[in-house]
């Protein structure tokens, strides 16, 4: 059993989950955003059995997707087995491929970031911001996000019905190969890259046109997080996950190094996967996988003990504040200042209670008023003394606290 003194998961220490003792640079960046670097989990026979059960119901013949499915299934089962020792929302960082997977390690460095237990749009925003911070540290430039959404269960069902009706109206116009492909998975109409069928695909029903009101709001919020963080994005209608378990947001992260543009990561929500794999309830979850070539000189591991212990808990109040919060966390990361946060929570009381239980030295309070005025409240936990500090001077102010 490993020493648990340096556990990263906030609020409550897990009893049995193994945490990584050392990480590469991507893991260090993830820690500053609140992720817990865990030892690479091992895919077990039970996970493979559950994935095979899904495959019988119509999974696409895609090896990469099958590997991803094994990984997500393992993480969800791990979460369910350890729920008593986890906080409500957990942030996992892990290196890939998972142990026990038939997938072999390639020449690229691979890692995963998953947030389990939260259905809120800020979860996608945290993943994307963290992934971009990792890739920028690795020397990639001109980052861009391609986004799409299939919405919730209601939206997916509506999209499927409309695609089937469209397919049947035009079946006589389609080549035999495409007829069989679309019959097997109707979403292949949207993914189709056959230039001869460009007009057919263009006129097909699109996910954005079949969203429920709740799904429209969810996606709208994600776009607002992108705009607030000055992250360039495009809507890519061809990004569609597997309708059996993927829901809401699908995205790709694209970047450039040495003049070469490439896809460096992809992610999606998998809220419906837990029930599909035989677990007793649905568990909201979203994850991203990164894959890129690391410079050989940048492969030295960092001992987790060397990552600064947090003395700050970041509390946000209101949606306007939440939109700007990730920019503040990133600016603190660049100063090597770690903060715990409750961005997947909305109520002040829940965040304040967590900060008190964790015995943080300082509380950073960022509300609607502060968001408008570009300020932040810094409160000393013991004395309750607090200052209102302009965001432009926050780094300078924190340096004075470090000297005390």
Image: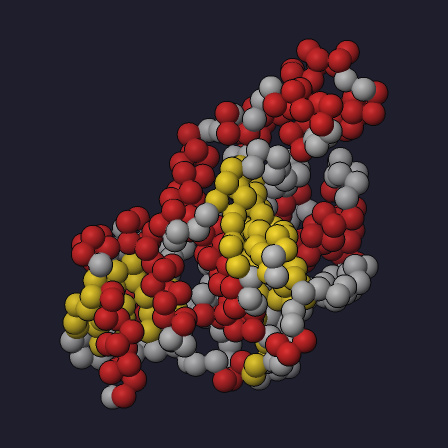
335 vs 326: above or below: below
Left or right: where 80 falls relative to 318: right
Question: Depth check: 351 or 259 in front?
Answer: 259
Foreground of the two, 387 or 252:
252
Q: Residue at x 61, y 76 (%)?
A: 298
> In the shown orientation, is residue 369 left or right of residue 118?
left
Which of the 4 image quarters holds residue 264?
Answer: bottom right
**Image quadrant where residue 95 sits:** bottom right
- Residue 133's spot in the image, x, y percent? 49, 63
The residue depicted at 65 percent of the width and 59 percent of the height is 291
68 to 303, vertically: above or below: above
Identify the image quadrant of the C terminus: bottom left
Q: Work out which residue is located at the far right of the displayed protein and give it.
A: 176
Residue 115 placed where, x, y %?
52, 56
Q: What is the image's colouring?
A: secondary structure
What residue do we see at 74% from left, 39% from top?
Answer: 59
Rendered position, 196 above or below 66? above
**Looking at the image, residue 384 lies above or below residue 246:** below
Query: In the figure, is residue 214 to the left or right of 153?
Result: left
Residue 359: x and y in percent read 33, 77
Q: How many marks?
A: 0
In the image, what residue occupies the spot 34% across and 63% down?
Answer: 328
**Of all residues shown, which one is farthest toward the bottom?**
404
Residue 398 visible in the shown view: yes
**Residue 118 pos. (x, y %):** 47, 51
Q: Considering depth in this image, is 65 or 228 the residue closer to the camera?
A: 228
Observer able to see residue 284: no
């Amino acid at each position: 059993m490993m020493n648990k003194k340096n556990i990263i998961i906030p609020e409550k220490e897990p009893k049995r989950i193994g945490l990584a003792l050392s990480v590469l640079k991507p893991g260090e960046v993830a820690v500053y955003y609140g992720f817990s670097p865990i030892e690479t989990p091992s895919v077990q026979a039970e996970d493979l059995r559950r994935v095979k059960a899904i495959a019988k119901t119509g999974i696409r013949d895609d090896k990469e997707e099958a590997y991803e499915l094994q990984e997500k299934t393992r993480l969800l089962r791990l979460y369910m087995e350890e729920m008593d020792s986890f906080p409500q929302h957990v942030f996992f960082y892990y290196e890939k491929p998972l142990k026990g997977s038939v997938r072999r390690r390639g020449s690229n460095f691979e890692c995963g970031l998953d947030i389990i237990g939260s259905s809120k749009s800020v979860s996608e925003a945290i993943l994307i911001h963290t992934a971009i911070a990792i890739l920028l540290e690795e020397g990639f430039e001109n980052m861009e996000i391609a986004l799409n959404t299939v919405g919730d269960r209601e939206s997916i069902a509506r999209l499927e019905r409309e695609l089937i009706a469209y397919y049947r109206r035009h079946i006589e116009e389609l080549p035999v190969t495409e007829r069989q492909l679309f019959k097997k998975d109707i979403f292949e109409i949207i993914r189709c890259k056959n230039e001869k069928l460009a007009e057919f695909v263009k006129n097909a029903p699109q996910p954005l046109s079949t969203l429920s009101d709740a799904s429209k709001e969810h996606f709208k919020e994600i776009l607002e997080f992108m705009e607030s963080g000055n992250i360039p994005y495009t809507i890519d209608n061809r990004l569609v996950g597997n309708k059996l378990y993927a829901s809401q947001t699908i995205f790709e992260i694209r970047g450039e190094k040495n003049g070469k543009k490439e896809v460096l990561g992809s992610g999606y929500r998998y809220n419906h996967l837990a029930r599909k794999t035989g677990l007793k309830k649905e568990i909201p979850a979203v994850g991203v996988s990164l894959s890129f070539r690391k410079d050989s000189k940048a492969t030295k591991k960092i001992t987790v003990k060397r990552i600064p212990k947090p003395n700050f808990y970041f509390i946000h109040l209101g949606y306007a504040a939440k939109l700007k919060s990730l920019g503040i966390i990133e600016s603190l990361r660049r100063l090597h200042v770690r903060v715990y946060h409750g961005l997947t929570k909305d109520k002040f009381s829940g965040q304040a209670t967590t900060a008190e239980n964790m015995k943080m030295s300082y509380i950073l309070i960022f509300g609607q008023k502060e968001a408008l005025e570009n300020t932040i409240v810094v409160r000393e936990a013991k004395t309750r003394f607090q200052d209102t500090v302009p965001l432009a001077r926050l780094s300078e102010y924190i340096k004075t606290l470090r000297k005390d």
